């Protein structure tokens, strides 16, 4: 898609997330990679009320080229793009169930949510936990950069998920799958659920290698 179409796609994505309660108030941000930089939702903007011409356009040094000032979490997106060349779009939310999981103690920091369903494995794979940093802390960007090269999605402790994809649609679908699996994870706490074993996970990787 050209830049104009990608601007429209970000606005549609934001409206969909907001309409379904996955983004509230001015929380959450969405970005896409361009040939000459990248687009990001503006700071203090509601994802349900985005305007294509007001989206921030930045270069790879983080400088604003056009549009409204970028989200203060721009460095999260930039770190993931730099670490993961295949990432063409990124969604960061404070969605209820994923954020709830991010606040739990005793999580496996290498894989926060177990492989409960085939679709979670296919779209997310392993979900590592990034240790807590205050919003806007530059050290969070470096922590992201260390993990993003090996994972298409991460969970920020006491914060929420950051999910990338080769298209904005794939990033959206993976974000939705993560939120639904986080809900399942919380519902199943204390119920000794069956999780997919190593052989079943390997089979999914063989049959669906391009799902993420």
Image (cartoon, grey):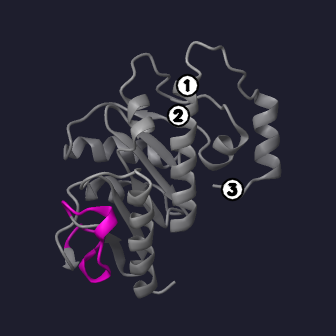
Nearest to the observer: residue 124 or residue 34:
124
Q: Are marks 1 and 2 in contact (CB under 8 Å)?
A: yes
Mark earlier in primary sequence (3, 2):
2
Query: Observer-nearest residue: 43 or 147?
Result: 43
Residue 122 x %, y %: 68, 47
Q: CA distance from mark 3 to mark 1?
A: 26 Å
Which mark is on residue 187? Answer: 1
Quarter location, residue 210: bottom right
At mark 2, the secondary structure is: helix
**Percent position (x, y) of residue 138?**
21, 46
Picture layout, residue 198 above or below residue 98 = above
Q: Residue at x 74, y 29 (%)?
A: 196
Task: Left or right? Give the position of 52 relative to 179.
Answer: left
- Image vertical order of residue 51 relative to residue 19, above or below: below
Which residue is found at the position 51% from the left and 51% from the top? Answer: 175
Residue at the disc numbered 2: 183
Of marks 3 and 1, which one's residue comes earlier in the chain? 1
Percent x, y of residue 76:
32, 52
């Amino acid at each position: 898609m050209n830049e104009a179409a990608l601007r429209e796609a970000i606005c549609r994505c934001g409206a969909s997330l907001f309409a379904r309660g996955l983004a509230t108030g001015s929380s959450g941000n969405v970005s896409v990679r361009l040939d000459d930089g990248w687009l990001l939702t503006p700071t203090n903007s509601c994802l349900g009320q985005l305007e294509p011409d007001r989206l921030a356009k930045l270069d790879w040094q983080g400088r604003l080229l056009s549009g409204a000032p970028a989200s203060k979490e721009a460095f999260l997106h930039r770190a993931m793009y730099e670490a993961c060349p295949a990432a063409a779009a990124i969604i960061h939310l404070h969605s209820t169930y994923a954020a709830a999981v991010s606040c739990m103690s005793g999580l496996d920091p290498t894989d926060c949510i177990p492989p409960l369903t085939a679709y979670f494995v296919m779209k997310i794979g392993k979900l590592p936990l990034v240790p807590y940093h205050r919003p806007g802390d530059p050290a969070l960007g470096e922590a992201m950069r260390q993990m993003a090269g090996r994972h298409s999605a991460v969970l920020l402790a006491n914060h929420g998920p950051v999910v990338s994809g080769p298209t904005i649609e794939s990033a959206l679908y993976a974000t939705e799958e993560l939120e639904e699996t986080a809900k399942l994870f919380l519902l199943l706490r204390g119920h000794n659920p069956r999780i997919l074993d190593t052989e079943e996970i390997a089979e999914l990787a063989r049959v669906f290698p391009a799902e993420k």
